[in-house]
Image: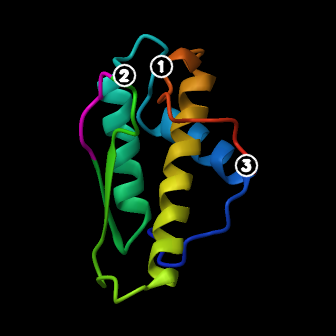
Amino acid sequence: MNAIKEIPELKKAQFDEWAEEIIKQYQIKDDETLENITQYIAEFFDKLFENYQVSFVDLHPDGIFPFAINRLDKKPGYADEEFYDELFKVENHIRWTYTLVLTLLYREKECPFDTVECPY
């Protein structure tokens, strides 16, 4: 896996590819703890997206997205729509790949509650 600077478009095929790569790379079994799976996904995206720092924050009891995402190479300017659009795209890549990893492991019920059906 090579780090990328340009965030790709949101496509289900890409989420599928990354989900399968994460499961294979980290040798995740269906009985792996949710904390470990979430940590592996954070590590994967932290290495993949060169300009971003992705970390596992906490498994929230209310089922909210468990990752922190920080842009490393620039800070948002006043009303910087482009900055936030890209950050939203990064968040969606992580969210849908995470959801697909859990789905492939037959653990859909452990997906964050704020996840709705993938629109891509």
Judge whether residue 69 is colored magenta. Answer: no
- At 59% from the left and 43% from the top, the residue drawn is 96
Relative height, residue 87 to residue 11 (above, below): below
Q: Which residue is mark 2?
A: 34
Q: Which residue is mark 1?
A: 110
Tell me if 35 is positioned left or right of 19 in this view.
Answer: left
Q: State the residue in front, 87 or 8.
A: 87
Q: Pick the residue in front: 84 or 7.
A: 84
Q: Amino acid at mark 1?
A: Glu
First to last magenta residue range: 56-61
The kind of secondary structure element at disc 3 is: helix
Between marks 1 and 3, how big is the CA–CA gap?
A: 20 Å
Q: Are marks 2 and 1 in contact (CB under 8 Å)?
A: yes
Cα separation, mark 2 vs mark 3, equals 22 Å
Picture residue at 42% right of the left edge, 10% below the top: 31
Residue lying farthest to the front in this orientation: 79
Question: Disc 1 vs disc 3: Cβ atoms closer than 8 Å?
Answer: no
Disc nearer the start of the sequence (2/1): 2
N-term-proximal mark, 1 vs 3: 3
Where residue 16 appears, as percent x and y from the top left, is 67, 42
Few, some or many C-alpha atoms within 10 Å of disc 1 (few <14, some 14-19, many ≥20)? few
> For the residue labelled by badge 2, is the local secondary structure a helix, a strand or a loop?
helix
The residue that appears at 41% across and 54% down in the rendered structure is 45
Q: Which numbered disc, 2 or 3, marks the residue that appears first in the sequence?
A: 3
Q: What numbered label is drawn on residue 12?
A: 3
